[in-house]
Image (cartoon, coloured by chain):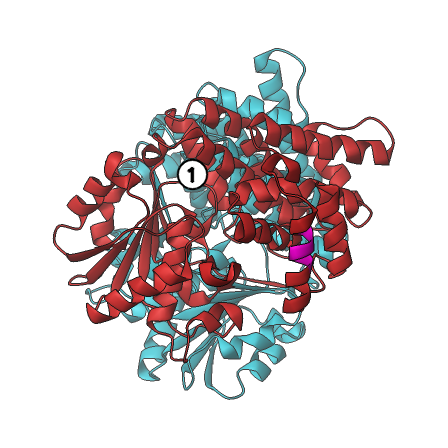
Chain colours: A cyan, B red
Amino acid sequence: MNNFTFYNPVKILFGKGQISAISNEIPQGARIMVTYGGGSIKKNGVYDQVMEALKDFEVLEFSGIEPNPHYETLMQAVDIAKRQQIDFFLAVGGGSVIDGTKFIVAAMEYKGADPWDILAKREPVTNATPFGAILTLPATGSEMNSGSVVTRVSTQEKLAFGSPFTFPKFSVLDPETTFTLPVRQISNGVVDAFTHVLEQYLTYPVNAPLQDRMAEAVLLTLKEEGPKAVHNPQDYDTMANFMWSATMALNGVIRTGVPTDWATHYIAHELTALHGIDHARTLAVVLPSLLRYKSGNKKAKLLQYGSRVWGVNAGTEDERIEATIQATIAFFESLDIKTKLSDYEVGEDTIKKIVARFEERGVKDLGERADIQIPDVKQILTMSL
Amino acid sequence: MNNFTFYNPVKILFGKGQISAISNEIPQGARIMVTYGGGSIKKNGVYDQVMEALKDFEVLEFSGIEPNPHYETLMQAVDIAKRQQIDFFLAVGGGSVIDGTKFIVAAMEYKGADPWDILAKREPVTNATPFGAILTLPATGSEMNSGSVVTRVSTQEKLAFGSPFTFPKFSVLDPETTFTLPVRQISNGVVDAFTHVLEQYLTYPVNAPLQDRMAEAVLLTLKEEGPKAVHNPQDYDTMANFMWSATMALNGVIRTGVPTDWATHYIAHELTALHGIDHARTLAVVLPSLLRYKSGNKKAKLLQYGSRVWGVNAGTEDERIEATIQATIAFFESLDIKTKLSDYEVGEDTIKKIVARFEERGVKDLGERADIQIPDVKQILTMSL
């Protein structure tokens, strides 16, 4: 097992009716900005529950945070919040609203010239305004980690940052808030969470059997509960199991002491930045090719994953690895998530663009062995055509 | 799945060499009391590493915290620490030293007349002096939770308390600190951690498949790594896997949203209080009888545990349950942990004493269904004779 540091101070309030408990979690007298997206929370009753819970606080609203939250929009929120002396934020929505709010709270306290440098130059975040979250879309895990991904529209860049200061103080996970989600968002969420686990699990063994089994626990649960969630999104237990699995997939527990990959995410972000394809779908396109391309590096873990998650036990090692990747693809496709670039009308032009962007940005050394270079990225994307 | 709150702000520093990192985790200028036990840390080099890491702080030592830490001893530490204006504690040892230090830090800030009331009357803890821990004995999980068990010698009572204020600020888990542990303490630790999982897992199903699999992940790892740890306690990876399993067994993760039992612990504490038997050994005595006595309540989970952890899949339900309990007993005995009261020269007299103490204390409603009454306790203990 590798050395590690684990720290996750997020308080989770899980279950039906928990939104009403947030008034106990926010400092008395706080001036709160409630951040949200396109307004679906006004249709499903979540907005009303939140406002009822906050009735003793001063509340300002900031709506319109997009999927893949835009730097430009978030900076508007920062501008208003500073003028209005906001001292607590409440993100209500999915991963984009929570990620966006993490950037807002970091930018609120940023002392440098341009908050964009937090993303572009990885300038450290040394403080942030406190915030909480109410999750309405299980997928990204943002509700229980300190990471964030932000997109700058003007330059078509999608970049990540994280800091010990950008953990939510609390997150409410009420499965009932997911009952009106569109099927497309549920299947995206299942694939997103599943891929988060694989990024931390399909690397190379370091004799960490507990972490392996914990990762497999999440995978097996998503495999079982994901299709049920898509077909019956108003079943409380199904959505609860899906919701908690997506959180556990990226709260740091399964990553303790093991190498992680994240090359799939790094490459896939470009497809969203350039074409606006849903994040989960870009993962489903890149992952299978990356696993095939790096199956030598990942052999032992691919065989274990195939056996323990998909019951693939017959054939040569190469046959089992291919059957395992095929099972993963079939799982994604069964959720109506397409796995080829051509399914999204993306071709070789885009691959050229991504390669050029990576060259400009100086990208190198991706993956758990830091051995994926730009020519490898080109190969992987070409295999996904 | 049941509603739940999860909160665990303990920072874990895991791996070889991590003791040196504690100087970054303690506030500058802190006046530190280092608490420890019988002095084994002076023989294995841990004491020297700690003192080297603390060389820029003012440090006072308090040694002599016993296994099953004594209220009387801990109050001596409180007395000295108050006089010396200690404002940070560092517990160096196993669960007893860490549990004892939790009581010290709570008593330091207790405003009531008698700190014993924290245990005896469950008076709430509303503040505590901050502390960190350096774990040298994987077993209790105390390094990553807020619970504590303290024994009062004068009255032979062993009682528990917990509070959000008694989480360690940080805990160092360096597997190398365990290399010189006596075999007896290693096998105790394996059985203690294993039983912690069973208390949270062998109840009744609430449709929480992720939590079930996470619990099984810890059980399977302890089943594999435990015997290896006993036979080869200087194998780094083995001890690392054992150490992290024992922590994950009781840090709140596997308990999220599921019922818990804890009747085995409650009953077993009496055997330590009255006879000084090692905590893990008292668990090994009580657990099998409790499982047999409550096999009706626990049927579904016992069958699942048998199948997934011990591969018990053949026979009638009753046969499988008995085979599963037998497999658990055989595992404990394989670690040289005896499972009968007679193995510890304890007889019916003690059962009578425990029943009388429970009657005096007004104990009732133990277990996940709150249906274990004093006559049931008598039955369970009688089955363990």
Vertically, is B347 above or below A155? above
Residue B17 as seen in the image, left or right of residue B370: left
Which secondary structure is most common in the magenta stretch? Answer: helix
Residue B138, given in percent of the width and then of the height, sits at: 43, 40
Chain at tag 1 = A
Query: Which residue of the protein is positioned furthest toward the left in this rendering?
Result: B56
Which residue position holds label 1? A262
Q: Quadrant of the N terminus of chain A?
A: top left
Q: Quadrant of residue A48?
A: bottom right
Task: Identify which amino acid the numbered label 1 is placed on.
Answer: Trp
Residue B142, given in percent of the width and then of the height, sits at: 44, 51
Q: Quadrant of residue B59?
A: bottom left
In the depicted view, which residue is nearer to us: A116 or B335?
A: B335
Residue range of the region highlighted in magenta in the rendering: B351-355
Q: Residue at x 21, y 70 (%)?
A: B83
In the depicted view, which residue is nearer to us: A227 or A74?
A: A227
Query: Callout 1: 10 Å neighbours few (<14), some, many (20+)?
Result: some
Residue B8, given in percent of the width and then of the height, sits at: 46, 58
**Residue A63 visible in image:** yes
Q: Residue at x 22, y 53 (%)?
A: B24
Residue B151 as seen in the image, left or right of residue A183: left
